[in-house]
Image (tube, rainbow, N blue to C red):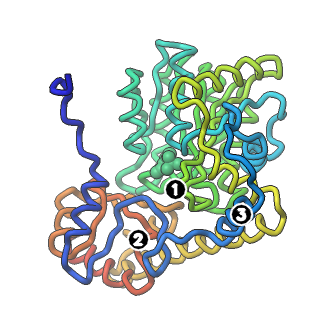
Amino acid sequence: MFETLKQQPADKILQLMLMYAADPREQKIDLGVGVYKNADGITPVMRAVKAAEKRIWEAETTKTYTGLTGDSAFTNGMISLLLDESVARDTIAAVATTGGTGAVRLGFELIRMMNPKARIWVSDPTWPNHIAILNYLGIEIKPYRYFNAETRGVDFDAMIADLQGAEPGDAVLLHGCCHNPTGANLNLVQWQAVADLLNDRGLLPMIDIAYQGFGDGLEEDAAGTRLIAASVPECLIASSCSKNFGIYRERTGILMAISADSGRQALVQDTMATLNRLAYSFPPDHGARIVSTILNDPDLRADWMAELEEVRLSMLSLRQQLADELRRLTGSDRFAFLAGHRGMFSRLGVSPEIVERLRTDYGVYMVGDSRMNIAGMNSKTVPILAQAIVDAGA
Ligand code: PLP
């Protein structure tokens, strides 16, 4: 039967990783894969994570199953971190998932379960896996314009105009912060306008937030999510701990669902637990336990926040350095948007030909849509990168 299988499309980012690894040039720069790297090109284990793992190892007496919804110390800790007091706790259902991807998948499945005809509106562009999962699940995708190719900021008027075409029962996928792949984000006035539109048209928001703490700070990055959650009757939120805790391989994420009132919470909670059961039974525990250990211990939490802030500031300073260097080389402000973007990514906004030239002639690897991982550079490679960008004709 295996002969009936069709070759699946290759993952472009993984392909890029292989090409980078095979490139013998010493002066090569990897801006491809979406993983944080420090100035030495290493994705470190955060101090608080190491300390939490030691504590867990010492204290853990059993590896028996947890609950289908995961450990409540984790789900409660994550609810506080993301939503604080913005919505009443007894309206929130939450389950631990296999990373942010697991939460996204489960959220889409829940939407399909509630309304098999629901269409899901996604920003153009978005994280490619959103599209792949929606296609796999057979859910109709409706793109909304998001990125202004001229300014490299959000094309907010176009976004709102497109979302006016959504119908009651549709869902709208929003990036909570640090938009992947563009780096262009909504401001709070725009978030409020989106909330009003969701209410006017009876749309269900689903927020995917995978980079809380990578943009303007832990609280600031949650502001849009909190505003939406507090403004609409129902809301889904998929959150990942991969980046901000640096625990990519532990597969730690959470899906939250906020109901209009506490009466629905139990039903939603039960349904999400069942979806976990149908997919893989119990969600992974180790990463979730690391997160709850950190969030519930004042010293570990303070240390984690301090290290996360170092990570955030280092990316901001690289953004600024690159924008400054490009201003110096071009004598123009054409690349000032790089300092205004937030998160791990920026879309440079150049043609696929220039992306190709950057790779072949200069050893600079970025995704074909010109998404750059800001953490892939360091203060020594920024000038080399800026020169390559200019020389390649950007
Ligand atoms: N959502 C977005 C927008 C992402 O960029 C990512 C990771 O790249 C995820 C979700 C999922 O992250 P993970 O499954 O690694 O936790």
Question: Which amino acid lies under the numbered mark 1 shown in the image of this protein?
Answer: Tyr
Which mark sits nearer the N-terminus, 3 or 1?
3
Which mark sits nearer the N-terminus, 1 or 2?
1
Q: CA distance from mark 3 to mark 1?
A: 16 Å
Q: Residues within 10 Å of mark 3 (few under 14, many from 20)?
A: many
Give the label on residue 52, or none: 3
Near-viewer residue (170 or 42): 42
**Residue 110 point in image, percent of width and height:** 56, 22
Q: Is residue 344 left or right of residue 21?
A: right
**Residue 393 point in image, percent of width and height:** 20, 70
**Do callouts 3 and 1 mark residues in contact (Cβ within 8 Å)?**
no
The relative height of residue 234 versus residue 322 in the rendered view (above or below) is above
Q: Element at badge 1? A: helix
**Do callouts 2 and 3 mark residues in contact (Cβ within 8 Å)?**
no
Q: CA distance from mark 1 to mark 2?
A: 16 Å
Find disc 1 in the rendering and name its residue.
248
Rendering quarter of residue 330: bottom left
Question: Which amino acid lies under the numbered mark 3 shown in the image of this protein?
Answer: Ala
Q: Is residue 290 left or right of residue 99?
A: right
Give the label on residue 187, or none: none
Is residue 228 something that shows in the picture? no
Q: Residue at x 40, y 27 (%)?
A: 142
**Which quarter of the rendering shows the N terminus?**
top left
Find disc 2 in the rendering and name its residue.
376
**Which quarter of the rendering shows the C terminus?**
bottom left
Near-viewer residue (292 or 344): 292
Q: Residue at x 49, y 39 (%)?
A: 157
Find out if the beta carbon at label 1 lies less than 8 Å from the nearest ligand 1 atom: yes
Q: Residue at x 63, y 74 (%)?
A: 310
Q: Residues within 10 Å of mark 2 (few under 14, many from 20)?
A: many
